[in-house]
Image (cartoon, rainbow, N blue to C red):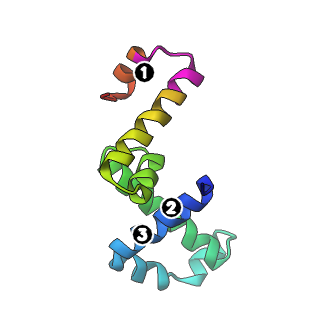
Amino acid sequence: MSQPGDNHQLALDRFLSDHPALATELDTLNPLAARAKGETLAEYRAERLNEAFEAEAERQGLFAWELTLKLTAESPETFAAQRLEVHKEVAQMAGLSWAEYCELYEVAE
């Protein structure tokens, strides 16, 4: 099984592949803007990519980790099962009943 970071990188790669205009924009970032933030161009680019990824997740009504699952799952059914499993783990860690969690985060089983 791949590590969560590996899956996230794969999701970012797929996201960029699906959004060529964003890839072009990221490839032409101004190095002076990165320097002004005290970052390398690579760090600045990664930050912009993650911002775009999170914005896309929000646009789809998902958390960023859900979009990662969606882009790396073998099928929509696999995505749904993995998503539900993670939500159940989070509910348990938060000490919420499954019903409370579902209501709070609008998760449908």
Quadrant for the C terminus in the image: top left
Residue tagged 2: 50
Amino acid type of the residue tagged 3 in the rendering = Arg
Q: Which mark is residue 101?
A: 1
- Prevailing secondary structure class for the magenta stretch in the rendered image: helix
Secondary element at tag 3: helix
Name the residue rendered at 62%, 78% in the picture. 41
Query: Within the magenta stretch, is there residue 93?
Result: yes
Name the residue rendered at 38%, 52% in the picture. 57
Sequence-first tag of 3 and 1: 3
Which is more toward the observer, 23 or 15?
15
Sequence-first tag of 2 and 1: 2
Secondary element at tag 2: helix
Q: How far apart are marks 3 and 1 (CA)?
A: 30 Å
Please determine whether, in this image, residue 41 is positioned above or below residue 14: below
Which is more toward the observer, 47 or 75?
75
Give residue 90's position: percent from left, percent from top. 53, 29
Sequence-first tag of 2 and 3: 3
* Mark 1 neighbour class, 10 Å CA radius: few under 14, some 14 to 19, many 20 or more: some
Viewer-nearest of discs 2 and 1: 1
- Which segment did they paint magenta? 90-98
Please tell me in which quadrant of the rendered image residue 63 appears.
top left
Quadrant for the N terminus in the image: bottom right
Residue tagged 3: 14
